[in-house]
Amino acid sequence: MVESSRLLPRSSSFRPESRRLLQSIPAILSSHRILLAVIWAVGFILIISWQKLAVDSFWGPPPRPIPRLRPIVFNLTDFGAVGDGVTLNTKAFETAVSEIRRRGGGQLNVEPGRWLTAPFNLTSHMTLFLAQNAVVLGIDDERYWPLMPPLPSYGYGRERAGPRYGSLIHGQNLRDVVITGHNGTINGQGQTWWTKYRKNQLNHTRGPLVQLMWSRDIHISDVTLRDSPFWTLHPYDCRNVTIRNVTILAPLSGAPNTDGIDPDSCENMLIEDCYISVGDDGIAIKSGWDQYGIAYGRPSSNILIRNVIVRSMISAGVSIGSEMSGGVSNITIENLLVWNSKRGIRIKTSAGRGGYVRKVNYRNLTLDNVRVGIVIKTDYNEHPDEGFDPKALPIIEDISFDGIRGKGVRIPVRIYGSPEIPVRNVTFRDVLIGITYKKKRIFQCSFVHGRVIGRIFPAPCDDLDLYDEEGNLVRRSKVTSRNNVTEVDYDS
């Protein structure tokens, strides 16, 4: 029989190698786990990237081609522009506009990218087209913004005496100007301006984002305007203006005076299908300031605002005034939604303004979570200087409200005329506003004369005459004599 020890290797001769092998196994396994984890992570990233590329390529919408809207078309890159958000492209914009002017008109396409620029001017017979994902960025250093004379109907810069900063995109005495696109953006980068304004570090009135002056046949559509240093879109003394499907954005607080659209001494204007959420009035119709506006004498008239959604935590959805010294008339505001705002609609003026607000029709308004729904205020005492005439009293008359709905409204109506500035011929019809404030006087009036047709909720103030749906007088105002307002012929 062979001994078993001869058939098996001696354990003593293999023991060190076996021990080293056993000791190395954890290190080998650990390094393999790290390698596998890296391979897995890289593979996961590649798969996600491939899926995104596949979706973008096969199922996502392809980049929208830029339409040819005029016979002559240029791209901004034709003039050396770089859309990296850092390179200053003012020269490219200026050269492009100059070439379009030389050619008698044309289209300038702003391609996808971030195009930093100082202010520049447009020209007549021009289309500025902002492609999808194109962003025009206003440089936030005021040294690059030119100074301009005060508006003639204001006399002074709105914030400071003397000259004012120009707008990022500007034009004067133009015809046939179009700003449109595939919802590209014009961004004023207003944060620096707002901070300097609050710290009193600016020597001149801030400039608007887009301002067109003494121009006609203007069309602005399908773009986003955001973070203006001051008023966002300011047509001044313009005719035949259409603003359609425009989004206007600014922070709801901390962005002072960032009105959305300010028609100023404008005639024949349409604003429709817009969304506005800003740090001041969503829309404010103006026509000059005190003695300067009276002397300039250009009213805002024939303006239609419809199908607009507005949010304003600081001011109102749609305002008239307070700068209305040239007059405001023939205004229709319909199909308006104001939500989560301080005020719904407002007319504001004061002694010294002069002028008038008349023939204003509000129809089909919805107020959703609004602190005060309807406001008419006659003591908005802000003046350019001491030269205003306190005897220049504005006229407010022929204002109608029809089809007003609301919920979560604290005070539905607040109309405060005065003995010197009574509010005349106000009509309410088909009003139903859900309230959150159960105080007795939630329909507030003073020195107002007008009528209510049919039943409305909440119950109107005693200042108004009551008529039934057929137009028959039910009850005369109980306070006509106190308000010192003569009777009005509603059908005149």
Image (tube, grey):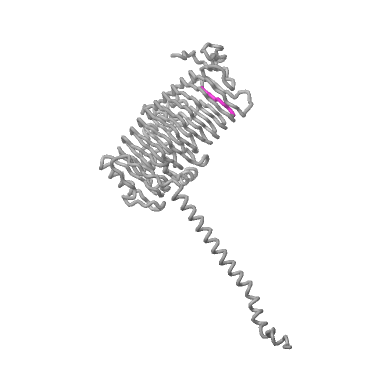
292 relative to 379 in the view: left or right: left
Q: Which residue is drawn at 47% across and 34% down?
A: 282
Q: Is 414 in the magenta? A: yes
Q: Residue at x 42, y 47 (%)?
A: 62
Q: Residue 441: tell me if it is visible.
A: yes
> Quadrant location of residue 28?
bottom right
Residue 133 locus on image (x, y percent):
42, 46
Which part of the image, by quadrant, shows the C terminus? top left
> Quadrant location of residue 328?
top left
Q: Residue 393: tell me if it is visible.
A: no
Q: Toward the viewer: 170 or 130?
A: 130
Residue 490 locus on image (x, y percent):
47, 14
Residue 461 locus on image (x, y percent):
57, 19
Q: Where are the magenta residues, as a range? A: 410-417
Residue 13 locus on image (x, y percent):
67, 85
Q: Main secondary structure of the magenta part?
A: strand
> Quadrant location of residue 162?
top left
